[in-house]
Amino acid sequence: MLKLGDKTVMVTILPTMIFGLLFAIPYIDRNPHRSVFKRPFAVALGLLFALTLVALSYMGTPQFGIETPSATRILQDLVPEEGTGPLREIPFDQLQTMVYEVGVTQPVNLCPDLPFGCPALEAVFTEFGSRVKQAESEGKFKDPRAVLLIEDWQANLKKITLRIVWADPESGATKTYDRHIFIHKDGEDE
């Protein structure tokens, strides 16, 4: 059953209805006068839609209680859609090809072949692990498995996959969220 707070209603049905009604106003209100004072129906309908858009915009803010899922928030903080973020700031030579699993791989000495190690990669992996464990302790994840996978994709190009797999605490269903990025040696990422 669809409710007012349902994503399908709020994202698809309601905006489509609002657009359709706004589009239909000239056909519904056939008043020949152009003065605002002689068109109370059109003015009232326009104000109603403006207030509805303001209310829906407010309902989409975190203050109203819309919460970003934990997996999305963790990966967005490490690899933001806009800007650089901690993962993209890791020097290319520290991106050693390997599977780093939270809780299995120790976040120290991840790059024994490098004389200086890879402190930037270790810091990001430690942050990733601590954020996943924090979400688990808050009850947002059940039995999470988190992986940082670095692959050689092409010459001078690395593919980095951040993946979190967990059991949903409410339904028990297995869920997966991952983010893929490509980092080039010359600093161009995709």
Image (cartoon, rainbow, N blue to C red):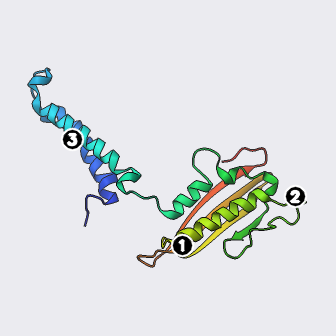
Where in the figure is residue 91, as x and y percent of width and height? 78, 51
Q: Give the SS element for disc 3.
A: helix
Image quadrant of residue 152?
bottom right
Q: Residue at x 21, y 41 (%)?
A: 21
Q: Amino acid at mark 2?
A: Phe
Query: Are there few (<14), some (14-19), or many (20+) residues within 10 Å of tag 3?
Result: some
**Residue 45: horizontal and vertical position, in percent?**
17, 37
The disc, 2 or 3, on the residue closer to the chain's N-terminal end is 3
In the rendered image, residue 151, in percent from the top left (x then y), is placed at 74, 62
Q: Is residue 176 above or below residue 19?
A: below
Tell me the number on the disc at residue 21.
Answer: 3
Verify CB contact (< 8 Å) between mark 1 and mark 2.
no
Residue ID for mark 2: 116
Earlier in the chain: of badge 1 and badge 3, it is 3
Q: Amino acid at mark 1?
A: Glu
Tally of numbered discs: 3
Tell me the amino acid under the disc marked 3. Answer: Leu
- Residue furthest right as drawn: 115
